[in-house]
Amino acid sequence: MENRTLIYNTIMPHEAQLVKDKLESEGISVLILNQQDSMYKAFGTIELYVPNEDAEKARAIVEDFRE
């Protein structure tokens, strides 16, 4: 994905939404790419991408979120 950096991935949709909401509350735009199989949610991941210039700040926010 051009000009975007993968910042987070998970298999749990609610977790992806929580991280997205946190990043957006900090002023970072987030693109979600859901690669989960529509029938078998156990296969595939949900990936969150941010603009390259926000990647470092986003990583710090995600790290704080995970603690």
Image: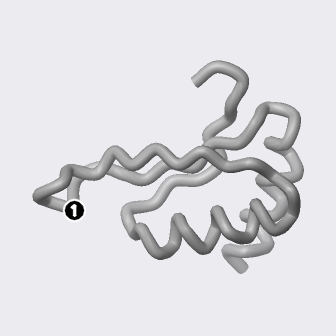
64 in relation to 37, above or below: below
**From the viewer's perspective, is residue 51 above or below residue 42?**
above
Quarter occupied by the N terminus = top right
Q: Is residue 2 left or right of residue 22?
A: left
Residue 10 rendering spot, x and y as whole percentages:
45, 60
Horizontal arrangement in the rendering, residue 45 relative to residue 6 (left or right): left
View extreme (bottom): residue: 67
Element at badge 1?
loop
Q: Dot 1: few (<14), some (14–19), or many (≥20) neighbours within 10 Å?
A: few
Q: Is residue 58 left or right of residue 15?
A: right
Instruction: Tell me which residue sits at (40%, 69%) in the image.
Output: 12
Q: In the rendering, at what x and y percent does residue 56 appear?
A: 86, 45
The picture places residue 44, in percent across and down from the top left corner, at: 29, 49
Position of 54 relative to 28 (above/below): above
Residue placed under numbered mark 1 in the picture? 41
Kindly identify the residue that appears in the image at 58 percent across and 49 percent down: 48
> Which residue occupies 53% across, 49% down?
32
- Residue 43 x/y as whole percent: 22, 53
Q: Nearer the viewer, residue 53 or 21?
A: 21
Name the residue type under label 1.
Lys
